[in-house]
Amino acid sequence: MLKPRQILIAGVGNELLTDDGVGVHAIRELEREPIPGVATVAIGTDVLRGLPYLESAARVLLIDAARGGQPPGTIYLFDSRAAGSGSPMHSLHAMGLREALRVLSPHCPPPPIAVLGVEPASLDYGMTLSPLVQAALPRVVALARKTVLEWLGVGPPIAAPSARAEWMTA
């Protein structure tokens, strides 16, 4: 379970829909070598299960499939507020989590949420990632590690996610 005010990396998405499950696949990879001071949780599609983790987190890195109009396998890093500000970025699940947090916890503001997204190649039925997204997975995991280590003050600085997305093509 998450310690109060801990950094959280959460993977969301539906594992039964190929690339939509990239967040859950990334969490499995991250759990092979845990990061001290960082909690990980595979939320999948069960938003309510993830709310207690999100409510007690100091900061959240959400890994998800995201649409930004770039080629499949492109990796995006953006502030979740960008998804609702007219930005071309669209996380497939971040808005639902953020809105659920607001409704269920109106007394406390949600923690800052950054989204590490991957442009999907396929959202068809299937439990494996498409070849393009599978090839991007090691870079997703590396960027997640780099991001939270920077947040902890033990890694080199990275560009802060902003209202506009930063992306790296496959």
Image: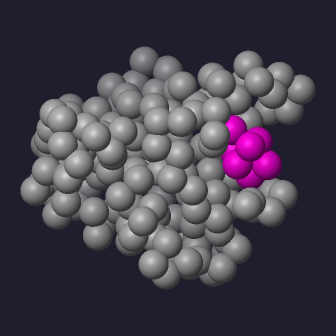
Left or right: 71 as drawn, with respect to 38: left
Residue with the most extreme right position: 107
Q: Quadrant of residue 111?
A: top right
Residue lying furthest left: 131
Q: Look at 33% across and 26% down and name the residue there.
A: 88
Residue 54, magenta (yes or no)? yes
Q: Position of residue 148 (x, y in %)?
A: 57, 66
Quarter the N terminus occupies: bottom right
**Residue 154, image x and y in percent?**
63, 80
- In this picture, which residue range is highlighted in magenta? 51-57
Viewed as shown, does residue 7 lie left or right of 165?
Answer: right
Query: Is residue 94 something that shows in the picture?
Result: yes
Residue 143 seen in the current view: no
Q: Nearer the viewer, residue 126 or 134?
A: 126
Q: In the visual, does 13 lie left or right of 155?
A: left
Q: Residue at left 77%, top 24%?
A: 104
